[in-house]
Each structure stands twice: as structure tokens, then as C-alpha cells.
Amino acid sequence: MNTPQITDISWQILQQNDQQLPPRAMDSHKGDHGHVLLVGGDHGYAGAALMASQAALISGAGLVSCTTRPEHISAYIARCPEVMVSGINSGLELAPHLATQKLLVVGPGLGKQAFGQLLLQTVLQYLEQTQTPQALVLDADGLNLLAEKPLITGQEVNFSKHAIIMTPHPAEAARLLGISTAEVQADRSAAILALVNKYNCTVILKGQHSLVAGKANSLDSEIKIYRCLDGNPGMASGGMGDILSGICGAILVQFLNLGLSPLAAAKLACCVHSKAADNAAQAEGEVGLLASDLLPYIRQLLQVSDEAIDINGVEITGVEIEGDQHD
């Protein structure tokens, strides 16, 4: 298979080509901007699901719910009351939450014990059985469990009829492909192509100059690969991937409402995440950069404006130029 040409992208490039969230209608309401449901947060990993939920809110989702261990509810409400948090202990308790149309983000803090396994199994079985196309961002232990249990629903997973973004780091990609991390890093383009073909979805392969790959639409046979030029070494800290999964969920649900592709959503989410880290590092330095430090920068980067915005001495300029939002 011939490897597609890699196209470089950045937050600035996407803005210059008008590949961003459009201005909101004056009469819009929260239902117009989608409902994101986070699934995760086992014992010891509560912060992951909470950070992903906060990132989804900051990135413009109209509503954000989170299903997690009951013990975490009070802490979540205290930290971010805008998140509608529910306590669950099993897949049976999760199932009613899947019955209404929501975009799912599964994996942050999910864990690989029985709790996480049953929740992932419930979600994937729901995707198999529903006749209506669904949207899902799969991250972290959602990916690790899928790698360990590829037949977790009784058959191989195929996401072709749904709008799916997977966000593995190199080690998670290696597990999903049954190869070593070194092999993934030696040919990142081949690895991301293999993941897109294996699972029929859009993929963000994280790392230095993260790659984004997928098809522009379900009828397109061509896979496109993009390389994000934003980002810095300060992002090598816990929770950064959880923030990305929340951004992906929020942008994906808004883009789908506009008739845009998961690939377009993944490109913007990846670049906004990395550019926010660059702006945060410019303001405070790379060493000790926290995942939650990105939140105010993410919000500012997603605004549609031609005016410069200053956050802690970092000038951010948004531009709106006519162009094609579609891939």
C-alpha cells in the first residue's frame, strides 16, 4: 500500500483556511451544541474523567455528563458543577444513559479491572446493536482493553458505520496492532494507516508532531494523513491525553451537527490542544506544565475573532477567512 502524502497543519493554518468552529447563531441554545457523555473514572483515576469533562465544556459542548464511581460525585460537583455527574458501578447501570443521543467519550480513567471492562463492553455492544450511527471518542484504557480483548463483544470491532475518533499514544497503538512501540515510532505513518484500516475510523496518533488520519467521508476510499506542527515537551505529563479526549468529544459533536467529518474535527482538536500547550508554556514555562493549565487557552483558541486576545502576556490572534471547512 502506498503511503499517502503527509500534509502539515497547525492551529494557525486551520484558522487561515477557516477550518474552525463557526460563529454561533444569536438564537442558539445548549441543545444546538451537542451533549457529550464521559464514561470512566475508576478508583484511583477520578481526575482523568473530570479533566476530560471540563475540557469538553471549555471546548463548547452544550451539555456534558459524566458517569463514574459514586464515590466521586461530591468532588466532581465541588470542582465543576456544570458537569452532570452520575454514579454507576456496572454496565447495567450505564445502559440507560446510552439510550438518548449523546456523543460518548470512553477511556479517561476507565481502568482495566472489571469496572472498566464491563463499561467498555456495554458501549461497544450498544454500537453493534443500534441502527442509528453513533459518535465516540475512544482513549486511554478504552484502547488498552480493546487491545487485550479484541473480541470483548464476541466479535471483532468494526466502527465503519459510526463516527469514531481513536486517540492512542505510541504504546497504545502498538498494543492495538500487536507490534512493539519501537516499530510504531520507526514508521508512524504506517502505524496510523494500519489503525485506520483495522478499525475503520479516524485516528490521532499522539507524540511529537502528532499525526491525524482518516477518510473525509464514508464514501471516500482515500485515507489522508496530517501532521500537527504545534506542541512542546511540556506536554509530557499526566492528564494531557484526557484533555485531548474531551476537546475531541466537544468538537466532534459540534462538527457533526454542521455536517462536517470526524477527520475535520480531529484535525482541529489536535491543533487546538497542542497550541494551547504552546501558549501555556510560553506564559509559564514547559517544566511543571499541568494538563489543567491548558483549559483557559483552549477556550480562547476556539473563539472566532479577528482581534488579538492576551492571556497572561501571550497574544493569540484568531482569524476568519473564507475557505472550505470540508476535507
Image (spheres, helix red, strand yellow):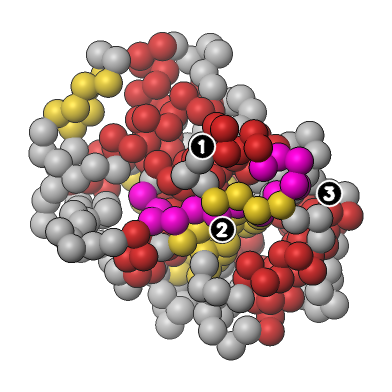
Helix, strand or loop at mark 1: loop
Helix, strand or loop at mark 2: strand
As displayed, is residue 61 above or below residue 127? above
Is residue 24 found left or right of 198 in the rendered image?
left
Pointer 2 residue: 37
Q: Label 3 to label 2, Cα distance in Å?
A: 20 Å
| Part of the protein shown in magenta | 60-73
Of residues 35 and 127, which is closer to you in this image? 35
Q: What label does residue 100 carry, if any? A: none
Helix, strand or loop at mark 3: loop
Q: Label 2 to label 1, Cα distance in Å?
A: 15 Å
User: What's under tag 3, amino acid-wise?
Assistant: Lys
As displayed, is residue 146 above or below residue 218? above
Pointer 1 residue: 80
Residue in the picture at 39% in, 46% down: 59
Of residues 252 and 55, which is closer to you in this image? 55
Q: Position of residue 48 (x, y in %)?
A: 64, 38
Q: Quadrant of the N terminus?
A: bottom right
